[in-house]
Amino acid sequence: MISVLTESKIHAFVQAGGYSSRMGLDKAWVEINERPMIEHVLAAAQPVAASLSIIISRDNPTTQRYRALADAQHARLLDDLHDHLGPLGGIHTALKSCNAAEAALILACDLPFLTTDFLTLLCARHQVRNPQSAIRNPQSITVPLNAEGRWQPLVAIYDQVCLPAVEAQLAAQRLRVDRLFETVPTQQVAFSDFAHLPGASQFFVNLNSPEDLSFVVKP
């Protein structure tokens, strides 16, 4: 796989395979413009990531469909190391798959309006270095904010050095991902920093119910 940022060792991990009670099915396979949502996310990430992975639950009933998708996208299919621990468990699974000095670009599968341009900007921000030093800046997490100023932890980059903090939160059953930002050096990327990109107002639109789909899918 050719990547414009292969030197970065930022690997993309799409969290998928969850059953949405509000949608009534696995959201990854809901089609937007005749294409499953997860395929939109993978397409946006592929040019900027050193590799692609899809994380699903070990008991997922559509594992074979995910495996076929992973093969077609030259991606790895990873079993989540945790049952019912939500996104934080998926982040742990991703970081356990990274080597030292690497990072995980964590993406939810239900964000079909993400773009390569935006993810390129996010990766570039994560790679900013101190001009006086060859050492990466002290931020270990890079997370964007939406137009209302809210964290978007499932469109964010986590260095592998975050692993002990993630494991500590899991052990304490503190499963909200944004609590990591209280203990791990984190840099924010303000919405104003990428508002100029085409489609920016929709980057973080996730689709949770059939009613949500009515706004983007033509009958």
Image (cartoon, grey):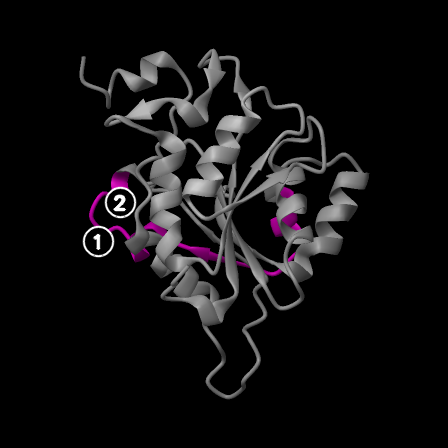
> Which quarter of the picture shows residue 212?
top left
Does residue 190 appear to the left or right of 165 in the view shown?
left
Does the stretch in magenta take in 135?
no
Q: Which residue is drawn at 42% across and 59% down?
A: 1
According to the picture, the residue beneath numbered tag 2 turns out to be 200
Q: What residue type is labelled 1?
A: His
Question: From the viewer's perspective, is residue 78 above or below residue 216?
Answer: below
Label 2: element kind? helix
Label 1: element kind? loop
Pick out the residue farthest to the bottom. 132
Does the stretch in magenta take in 181?
yes
Circle 1 packing at 10 Å, graded few (<14), some (14-19), many (20+), is: few
Q: Where is residue 172 in the image (x, y as percent from the top left)?
A: 80, 38
Q: Which mark is residue 66?
A: none
Region rendered in magenta: 179-201
Contact? badges 1 and 2 (CB < 8 Å): yes
